[in-house]
Image: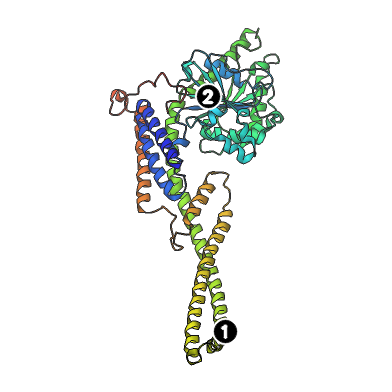
Amino acid sequence: MLGSQDGQLERRLQSLEKHLERENPVLLKAVQSFRELDWIAHRMGLLDTTESYATRVPWWPLISVLGTFSAGKSSFINTFLDQKIQRSGNQAVDDKFTVICFSKEESSHTLPGMALDADPRFPFYQISKDIDSVAVGEGKRIDSYLQLKTTPSEILRNKIIIDSPGFDADDQRTATLRITDHIMNLSDLILVFFDARHPEPGAMKDTLEHLVAKTIHRADASKFLFILNQIDCTVQDDNLEEVVAAWQRALAQAGLTAGRFYQIYNPNAAQPINDDTLRERYEAKRAEDMEAVMERVDRVEVERAYRIISVLEHTAKGIESDVVPKVTDLLATWRQRVLATDIVMVGALLITGLVMFFNSSMTLDVALEHLFMSFDGSNASTAAFGLAWWIHVFAIGVGVVAVGYLHFLNRRFHAWIIGSGIEEDEEHPELPDLIRRSFKRSTRPIRSLFAKKPAGWGGSARKRLAAVLKDTDVFVQNLNDRFTNPSGLKGVDNPAIHPAIEESDNSSTGNSSS
């Protein structure tokens, strides 16, 4: 079974490399660097042998649309795709996360959540396990949380869009927030929608807490765009500025004081604006902000390429700068505690054994001598001495085995105590688990107590990791050559700098090329 899983992983990586060879040769080389990280992580126990860092990264641009109910998320997606693929309305019309991808089929199709949970090519592979970890039993109800929709819209070729349910009045809040966190970590661009009809803080408390307060200090905070939708509702009172000010105050109270805030509406569903001057002002504002939003959407593929290299670099640096030093410190603490306990334990056993030995030695000799005299009086003394000697040797052997057994129990006990004491890290939630896994592997019974470095971390691992970090700089330079041209030269025509990118296979569906 394990071998088949290893083979499945290798086939997935080979399929990914085949696709990237056509789409982006720079990222193709990045897969090889991910393989190097896998080798290190497998030796250190950070990854199972059936796992790869490369499969944890969505290699296709991922755009997520989050926000409150009735904020116009689905209408925006329908307009963007020029197809009514999502239901829309003033109430909560869709309570699932919907993954939308391209298909060559002329008509759209809706597939259940298990199509995402069981397919490693999509960003929700085995998400049911994560749901179960925060809401026991809910993982079996994956179809209640996720669905997959396909569309022939060419604008979505080689991209994925995720439409989310609103945050309000959600009976499955814990699991929903877990999926939302998963989406935010994987996405290249996140559009956070608010309803201009309800801009006051009370109506979007949960959204402010989860999508603003918890995201503003992220290293990738720039991928969040905050959009006030349906501003046409302010036409009647002509109070757009007041509504926008109230909305921005609410965001500021949540900690978001910088960045651009977008204001849009759907002209197909907007209230009629009879005043020409007013209509021109609203249309101009919408056009300006929509152009800015769509510009970010168009750039998502470029940002995706840099993000993948950033993940590669972040993972490599995390192993070297965070995991290794922390596990090294934990091993030093563990070693000191085990040795201290061993000294106390062995000392106590040794003193007890010596006392028992001297107290029982003469008694044992006399008893054995009387026993043997009943059989052979002439040799009773010699036979008694010999048997007593072997009994003492056996007792010492039993004592040594007992000490060894207690030593390994001692190792295991302190490893459990120290491992259980590793604190969670809100800023880097994945780090504690990596530290626990490496520490557990480093304290296995077959490993020396005096090994100072984590298991699997040696000269070869250090050299490979250094090579990966060096490669990330080269990858960034290659991406810069491809996407920028500060010199003004026509380097884009140079295939040595800008490898040709062929159009993806027409038979692909979404990111199914991998």
Percent x, y of residue 479: 37, 31
Dot 2 alpha-carbon crowd within 10 angstroms: few under 14, some 14 to 19, many 20 or more = many
Q: Is residue 484 visible?
A: no
Residue 192 lies in what quarter of the image? top right
Left or right: residue 108 versus residue 144 is: left
Which residue is farthest bottom? 378
Q: Give the mark nearest the N terminus, 2 or 1.
A: 2
- Residue 142: image tag: none
Percent x, y of residue 308: 43, 34
Percent x, y of residue 109: 54, 18
Residue at (67, 16) in percent of width and height: 233
Percent x, y of residue 114: 56, 29
Q: Is residue 461 visible?
A: yes
Residue at (55, 30) in percent of width and height: 259
Q: CA distance from mark 2 to mark 1?
A: 81 Å
Residue wearing tag 2: 161
Dot 1 alpha-carbon crowd within 10 angstroms: few under 14, some 14 to 19, many 20 or more = few
- Residue 360: image tag: 1
Left or right: residue 481 versus residue 393 is: left
Residue 169 lies in what quarter of the image? top right
Q: Nearer the viewer, residue 283 or 89?
A: 89
Is 55 drawn above or below residue 463 in the view shown? above
Q: Secondary structure at mark 2?
A: strand
Residue type for callout 1: Ser
Residue 488 lies in what quarter of the image? top left
Q: Nearer the viewer, residue 206 or 31?
A: 31
Count of number-bearing discs: 2
Q: Nearer the viewer, mark 2 or mark 1?
A: 1
